[in-house]
Amino acid sequence: GQHEAAKLLLAAGLHVDCRTRKGMTPLAMAVQGGHIELADLLLKRKANPQIKNKREQTVLELCKTEEVRAVVQAALQAAEEAQAQMEEARAGGEGKKRDRSNVRKKRGKAEEEEEG
């Protein structure tokens, strides 16, 4: 029931990280209630597991069961790994840009030599 309702709300445009007056996100409420399938759905829809509620509680602190905690921890780990890969790609991309600029300089010199 809740899983299908969440799908409908998300499809209708509900922001995955919307908050209640107490600062609770749908993910926080799902983990607090022990709803593992709903938590998994929200995480797959890019819910932020690092948002704290007004009591400064994290999603991990609100997990009702170890099974739900494992799902959240896996999502956090996957996000960290993805971030690390993006940073590595950026670092590698910067090196490639420098290499291309060197190629452009060499081409420019070759053209000057042909003209001169």
Image: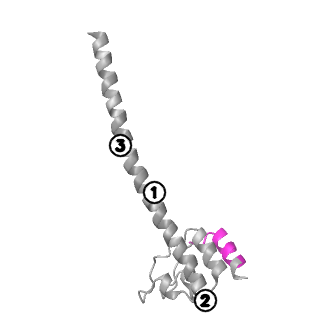
At x 38%, y 40%, the residue is 96
Mark 2 → mark 3, Cα distance in angstroms: 48 Å
Q: On screen, 12 above or below 25?
A: above
Assess whether residue 19 is covered by the magenta stretch.
Answer: no
Who comes first in sequence, dot 1 or dot 2?
2
Q: Amino acid at mark 1?
A: Gln
- Is residue 23 among what the camera can see? no
| Residue 103, x across and y down, in percent | 35, 29
Task: Identify which residue is drawn at 49% across, 83% down.
Answer: 60
The residue segment tinted magenta is 4-15
Residue to which mark 2 is pinned: 33
Residue 109 x/y as whole percent: 28, 20
- Mark 1 residue crowding within 10 angstroms, few (<14) / some (14–19) / many (20+): few
Report how far apart the C-alphas of labels 3 and 1 lie in the structure.
15 Å
As helix, strand or loop, the secondary structure at mark 3 comes to helix
Q: Does 45 sit left or right of 3 as displayed?
A: left
Q: Mark 1 highlights which residue?
A: 85
Tag 3: amino acid: Gly
Residue 58 or 91: which is nearer the viewer?
Answer: 91
